[in-house]
Image (cartoon, rainbow, N blue to C red):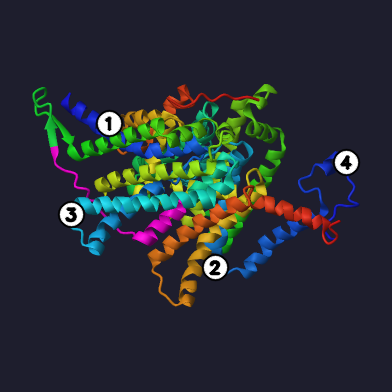
Amino acid sequence: MFYRENGQFKTTYRADQQILPIRQDRIVMALLLVFAVAVVPMLATDYFFRAILIPFLIMSLAALGVNILVGYCGQISLGSGAFMAVGAYGAYNFFVRIPGLPLIPALVLGGLCATVFGILFGLPSLRVKGLYLAVATLAAQFFSDWMFLRIKWLTNDSPSGSVSVSDLQVFGLPIDSALSKYWLCLGVLVMIALLAKNLVRSAVGREWMAIRDMDVAAAVIGIRPMYAKLSAFAVSSFIVGVAGGLWAFVYLGAWEPAAFSVDISFRLLFMVIIGGMGSILGGFLGAAFITLLPIALSQILPALAGLAGFEISTAGVSHAELMIFGGLIVWFLIVEPHGLAKLWSIAKQKLRLWPFPH
Amino acid sequence: MAFFLETLLGGLMAGMLYSLVALGFVLIFKASGVFNFAQGAMVLFGALSMARFSEWIPQWTGVDSLLMANVLAFAMAAVVMFAVAWAVEYLVLRHLVNQEGATLLMATLGIAYFLEGLGQTLFGSSIYKIDIGMPKDPVFILEGMFQGGVLVNKEDFYAALIAAALVALLTVFFQKTSTGRALRAVADDHQAAQSIGIPLNRIWVIVWCVAGIVALVAGMIWGSKLGVQFSLATVALRALPVVILGGLTSVPGAIIGGLIIGVGEKLSEVYLGGYVGGGIEIWFAYVLALGFLLIRPQGLFGEKIIDRV
């Protein structure tokens, strides 16, 4: 009844090609932004910011980056954790070695380090495809694990690669309270999401999708596979690198190489696949699901066990978490292999007809 | 020279163990096109059940011979692995037929998480040991040829022997039995196999069972070497370069790939590791595999990938 585009006539190409062509979508998006910027800070507690919202925002950003590579360009990558690590340690090196460098340029420089690293480890994609490539990208993961543990220069000679940062500032404002961190992450996320959305609608985005759908056919119609694949690796690893920088600087504050282990890579891929491949919205949904699920489980399980009347040890909880996490992922893949974003688009279709389905 | 030979032999034996894990990957990929990331979790699961059963059986039944207890434990662990294989096929794979490779990959990762949790819930999460009576003392061979001889770890040697025996057994199973022929037919062409009356679902269960047994043997050997603990699941990550080096669809590839990776790892660690700070073996294996892939994108023995538009 309310979600109809009837009567919204487009008189220019510009109007026809905007990101959200339906007025109701624009209103919802604007309301959502206002809610995220202004209302959430009034409602959320300090714990809520630190444990849920900030990790969710940063992981959404990372999932967005991975989605560009996996969902739009079709190159399965298990090395995202490495790109995050390079982004984080790259930003750290610039931050420490150039006195007075503000946070944002440090993050961007870290992202550029990740870009270089991503292109380097994206080179095999020109020759190797599919599952072989997925395994090959694990090389990046293990190489970065080793690099930040053993090459002392990269971690400013700190033992076992653990480093920390303090006195973060953006435009002269200190980033120390949970609220300011939240706003910073939200700002970066919105900016990059907008850029990414526009990028995948542009010529290069269509090239990526052509490569994903059938790379030989794409090459035949004149798309350069090398340029398309490497640009996808570059853009994706830049975004993932910035997310890594944020994760380290803003969320963790002090970290070591193990913070970006292969487990993070798996989780990022989960977010993309559960959220929906080739969908910007999917990254957000997937990140919300994968980030919140363990937190929710760790809260609910002991309570449930208490209700059922038996004690459950911390080890038992963590094992049960693993089981439920794995089981839910499998279940989700079975009931909706195209991800949560697909569910959303089905809901939208239903909503257009509602309440008169015929 | 003796030192070089020693490293080489050590590498070959480690490689044999890698190829055991890699074999599990290859079997399942060949038959069902699923890249089974849960193989590591299956190794852990098998090792855990083996370790715990061999501990429990003497308590339950009063069997006091080590051999009997181990044989019984192995049989029971095998039953557990069969149950896992059946459940995976029945509950998961059956519903995901014809999905994309990435989705299947993620599903097996989900299974891996589940099995890791379940295994530790059922069997406990401390460090256990498997004692299958393998001699641990090192011996020296070729003492006539080199000063001091070449040091060989007897345990590794027996492990490599068991691995070789398993591979021989599998080869016989695949080449000589009718089930084996059916498995090869399915691996060749799903539709053709189905059209001549081979039941795909049953074949997939059998393949997962075989892979479960391979995982159990791998878990038993790795477990008796390193102790059974959570980190055993990461053995799969060390075996992945073996799989892509040898080719995802080739059983001999898994063996030879394992040997190459094992030797490469050991030699690189000994001769190169000193210059760059050590600990390079894990990524060196991947880089080695990548180097091979750049020349042959389908791995050493994999089927040639033909792209059609």
**Residue A227 in the figure: left or right of residue B77:** right
Of A197 and A350, nearer the camera is: A350
In the image, are marks 2 and 4 on the same chain? yes
Of B278 and B212, nearer the camera is: B212
- The chain containing the residue under callout 4 comes to A
Residue numbers of the magenta segment: B111-138
Please give the residue where the numbered disc 3 appears in the rendered image: B65
Please give the residue where the numbered disc 2 appears in the rendered image: A46
Question: Disc 1 marks which amino acid?
Answer: Leu
| Label placed on residue B12 | 1
Question: Disc 4 marks which amino acid?
Answer: Thr
Query: Could you tell me how far apart the alpha carbons at marks 2 and 3 are, in whole angstroms?
Result: 61 Å
For marks 2 and 4 on the same chain, the one whose residue lies earlier in the sequence: 4
Quadrant position of the N terminus of chain B in the picture: top left
Q: Residue at x 46, y 53 (%)?
A: B113
Residue B248 in view in this figure: yes
Viewer-side label of 1, 4: 1
Query: Could you tell me how far apart the alpha carbons at marks 2 and 4 are, in whole angstroms?
Result: 47 Å
| Label placed on residue A12 | 4
Q: Are marks 3 and 4 in contact (CB under 8 Å)?
A: no
Question: Image quadrant of residue A319?
Answer: bottom left
Local packing at callout 4 (Cα closer than 10 Å; few below 14, some 14-19, many 20+) is few
Question: Disc 2 marks which amino acid?
Answer: Asp
Quadrant position of the C terminus of chain B in the picture: top right
- The chain containing the residue under callout 3 comes to B
Question: Image quadrant of residue A203?
Answer: top right
Residue B268 inside the magenta-drawn segment: no
